[in-house]
Image (cartoon, rainbow, N blue to C red):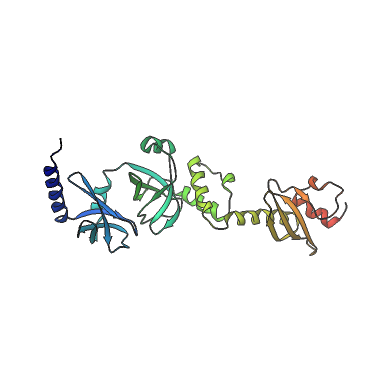
Amino acid sequence: MTDIRKLINQIAEAEIQLSANQFIAPCVKGGRVRTKVAGMVYTFTPKPRQFEGWGIFQPVDAKTATVVESADLPQIAEYLQHFPQIRLRLANQLRGQTWLAYPVNEVDMRQRLQLVKPIAVHLVTEGVAFEQIITRCHGKSCWFEEIDRRTDPIITETLQSAIQQLTPAAKLQFKGMTPEMRTVYELATERIEGFQLQQDEKRLRKALQQGGGELSQFQDHGDYWTVNWRTADGIRHTSAIAKIDLTVISSGICLSGRDRDFDLQSLVGVMEQQEW
């Protein structure tokens, strides 16, 4: 049977030891910090409350710890070396120094953490979208360690260029691309406001320009768009266009039931010639 008095004495000694010592810990803005003394885990609210980064903390009482100073790189490295290393690729910034990232190798991550999913990485002090990084994960938390200098920088540049060109994830293709790269690209584009809308506009505008027409505006109706456009001579038209392959659902003029024989590009010439 456990000696209650002995246990109480152990707790008291641990608390005395805790208040007399400083500890290093990572902290996200608005979060809390933890340390372990004599096998017991203590959780503190940092002071100042909005501190973010690696700090050296001094316990004030059982609930609060003051930031004494920022931890230096050797101290951070020593702290992190106790946790498993995972290579991830950055997708997009969530808030402050926290980024969403995805594993570079799904098989490796499943073996190490028994799961594969996007991960929030904290205290990312350097790096840009699609850059490969080295992290250390402990429990549900994952902490940035450094940029992975061994990876090919061309991959990062290629993914960044693709997103600037509004390339759909389904059409993303380049030498050395992996399924994991396509997934991180999808994660990045999902969080860009209006990305899909910009893709749709680019697709419609390109088809019309190739036929000699010009896009005015369009409306989304689920499986199709209502497209307002002009021929080269300025005549305005409104047509219903299927999203899947830009097939004409309704041209806006009588084509004797042959609307679906055309796509948006070829429809421009038909409108100009008015042969139907």
On screen, residue 101 versus residue 17, left or right, reads right
Of 123 and 87, which appears nearest the observer? Answer: 123
- At which x and y percent is residue 108? 40, 36
Name the quarter where the N terminus is drawn. Answer: top left
- At which x and y percent is residue 229? 74, 60
On screen, residue 119 versus residue 188, left or right, reads left
On screen, residue 212 versus residue 87, left or right, reads right
In the image, what residue occupies the spot 69% across and 57% down? 219
Snapshot quadrant of residue 22: bottom left
Of 260 and 230, which appears nearest the observer? Answer: 260
**From what the image shows, is residue 188 above or below residue 178?**
below
Snapshot quadrant of residue 206: bottom right
Residue 178 visible in image:
no
On screen, residue 262 versus residue 136, left or right, reads right
In the image, what residue occupies the spot 12% across and 49% down? 13
- At which x and y percent is residue 78? 24, 48
Of 76 and 31, which appears nearest the observer? Answer: 31
In the image, what residue occupies the spot 13% across and 46% down? 10
Of 169 and 272, which appears nearest the observer? Answer: 169
- At which x and y percent is residue 9? 11, 47
Residue 93 visible in image:
yes
Total labels: the figure holds: 0
